[in-house]
Amino acid sequence: MTDAGRGCRTVRAVIGVWRWRRNPLRRATDRCEAWTALVSLLLMAVAAPALGWVCGTLTDTALQRTVREQRARLHATTAVVVRLAPGASRLVTDPEAAGERGPRASVVARWRAPDGTVRSGTVTTWSRSVRSGSRVEIWTGPDGRAAQRPMDAPAARTHAVLAGVGVALLAAGLVEGGRRLAVRSMTRRRYARIDRAWAETGPDWGRTGTGN
């Protein structure tokens, strides 16, 4: 069942028991169940989204700091393709990026490090042209060695939003699970009291008014 379905069930439980509040057949456990459902509803409607927002904000702050650190440490430069790397083939590992830049490929390339020295090695590129002599953009570290492309700010924010939504849904699920456990415990205690009462009165059932 989805979180929306659980929430609707909780709302129906609150409304149903609220209508019973003046019914003479209302039991004490009905009132406890109503309060449990109401508290669960408030937690799912207020606390869970708030927790998700806090988690998403903290995650976004941390990821954006990582983005800035990577941008400050890594440098974009242009490399010249020498040839395809041995055994290399086009790989699609990110459908969104592939739609914009095409599948990635591993090539042997040559570039200049920040200190002016010529470096060469196997790098990964999203460039559509990987023929010998083609120019591709790569990222290098302070020592001039090839490095992974740094994360960009929009991607970091997307990850933060997904983290926040995931935490909010998880919190709502935990609240609903706690409510069900509490209601199940109250139901078991209710049946236990009924069984004890029946055990005490059962042997005399039907004897009242018989004249015996």
Image (cartoon, helix red, strand yellow):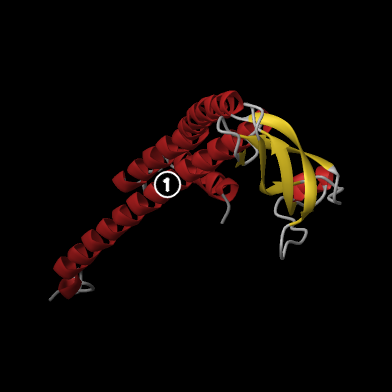
The one of 123 and 92 positioned closer to us in this rendering: 123
Callout count: 1
Left/right placement of residue 130 relative to residue 148 reads right
Q: Amino acid at mark 1?
A: Leu
Foreground residue among 19 and 86: 86
| Residue 122 percent coordinates (x, y) | 67, 51
Question: Extreme front residue here?
Answer: 117
Q: Which of the 4 quarters of the picture holds residue 197? A: bottom left
The quarter of the rendered structure image containing the N terminus is bottom right
Which x, y percent locates residue 119? 66, 40
Secondary structure state at the residue bearing disc 1: helix
Could you say where residue 98 lies in the image, as x and y percent from the top left?
79, 49
Residue beneath label 1, please? 174
Around disc 1, counting alpha carbons within 10 Å, would you say few (fewer than 14), some (14 to 19), or many (20 or more)? some
The quarter of the picture where residue 140 lies is top right
Say left or right for 200 vs 59: left
Q: Is residue 122 above or below residue 89?
A: above
Considering the image in quadrants, where does the C terminus appear?
Answer: bottom left
Give the vertical position of 90 relative to 19 (above or below): below
User: Is residue 165 shown above or below 53?
Assistant: below
At horizontal 30% and vertical 55% (from top left) the residue drawn is: 185
- Whether residue 16 is visible to the viewer of this picture, yes or no, is no
Residue at the image point whose x is 35% and y is 53% from the top = 181
Is residue 141 shown to the viewer in this render? yes
Residue pictured at 55% horizontal, 48% vertical? 3
> Which is more toward the observer, 129 or 51?
129
**Residue 91 place in picture, x, y as percent:** 74, 58
